[in-house]
Amino acid sequence: MLFDPAPKSSRRDFFDREAEIERVKSLSSPITLVLGLRRTGKSSVIMISLNELGLPYIYVDLRKFEEKGFASYRDLVVELEREVNRLTGRFPGLLELLRRVEGVEVMGSGVRLRWGGRRRVTISSLLEALNDWAEDRVVFVIDEAQELINMRGANLLPALAYSFDNLRRVRIVLSGSKMGLLYRYLGVEDPRSPLYGRAMNEVELRPFSREMAEQFLRLGLSELGIEFREYDMVYDTIGGIPGWLTYFGYYYGQDRDLGRALERTLRTALGLIREEFESFLRTRYMARERYLAIMRAVSRCATWSEVRRALEASEGARVSDSELSNYLTQLMDSSWIVKTERGYCPSEPLIGRASGAEGPSHVEKNRF
């Protein structure tokens, strides 16, 4: 069902993205990057690709640690332990290789991974064991991998570089909705980074165009036996993010009331955007009001000078070029805004609506 809000694992429940799925499935580089704004279908594309490839995989989702602002090495190892035990449940023969890995304790049909002390397990040793065990290839997925930039207690870049250069049967897939932050973490263009100069398979998922959004809604509503014509109104109201269009289709299918479905979609979308921006601000508390002022300024796009004037009016004090540049870079790296010919703009329409000063009453209370 196209309008099921949960991530998809089969093409029959997914719309388009055929080329993107095939590029992920190619695993043409030791590291594949799956990039795109939130709710453009990255997790679904990865899961569909994994299911169609039929290869063993480990899947770690770092989204659960965004709320606290960082993930520790212990957090990562606990997630890995759960995934390794899922894998050994399907492939008991893997246990014999894992017995040889320092920091891994085999207990019956499962394992325990040590996360602390001098003999803690290392990611490179785990990947090496998976490489030695795999007959074909094994896939190691980290969803929202840009959160690794804030990891405490370990640096995964050397392990990723080691795997890239030496482990021929390991394929790594990293997804990222904060694209600038992920690029900065990986440092492919930074001579100081272990991954400097490595060529990666990059797959970007963009929002749907007006035409594609109409096709998506038309197909999903036809599954429900519903005739519909107001495609332009829906696109003009919520844009082309597949996740928001899915919410609209789900809500419209319940009572077939266009106005109510749009209102419910906006409430859901703006509430989620607000929560996510609060998570962004949580580690930037001292500059909170400045970020809010900038987002209000760029809600309908603004030049550097316009942003600066708005921020200084809000602050009642001068803001230096370096400070403003840092704030804008942080917002761009985290995909809240983009730089265009018009200046700095929200990366998608509902971010602008959430941060702007105008809008109907049901939107205003969800502003930043």
Image: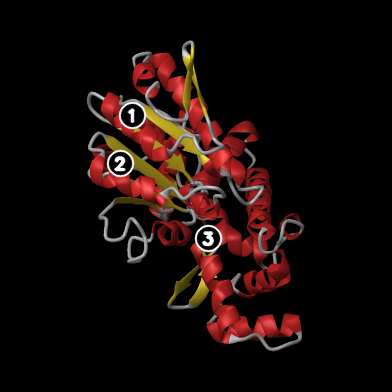
Nearer the observer: mark 3 or 1; the answer is 1
Q: Which residue is disc 2 drawn over?
A: 24
Tell me where residue 10 appears, x and y as whole percent: 39, 28
**Amino acid on which disc 1 is placed:** Ala
* Residue at image point 44% right, 56% down: 182
Identify the colour scheme used.
Answer: secondary structure
Nearer the observer: mark 2 or 1; the answer is 1
Number of marks in the rendered image: 3
Label located before the other in sequence (2 or 1)? 2
Position above or below: 122 against 314: above
Q: Which residue is disc 3 drawn over?
A: 334
Label located before the other in sequence (3 or 2)? 2
Position above or below: 307 against 279: below
Badge 2 marks a residue whose secondary structure is helix
Position above or below: 41 against 329: above
Q: Which residue is disc 1 drawn over?
A: 129
Tell me where residue 186 appears, x and y as whole percent: 39, 56
Left or right: 2 with respect to 116? left
Label located before the other in sequence (3 or 1)? 1
* Residue at image point 32% right, 34% down: 128
Q: In which quarter of the image is residue 367?
A: bottom right
Left or right: 294 with respect to 121? right
Q: As rendered, which of 175 and 222 lies closer to the eye? A: 175
* Residue at image point 69% right, 73% down: 290
* Residue at image point 44% right, 38% down: 122
Which mark, by number, is residue 141?
Answer: none
Left or right: 296 with respect to 128? right
Q: As rendered, which of 114 and 184 lies closer to the eye? A: 114
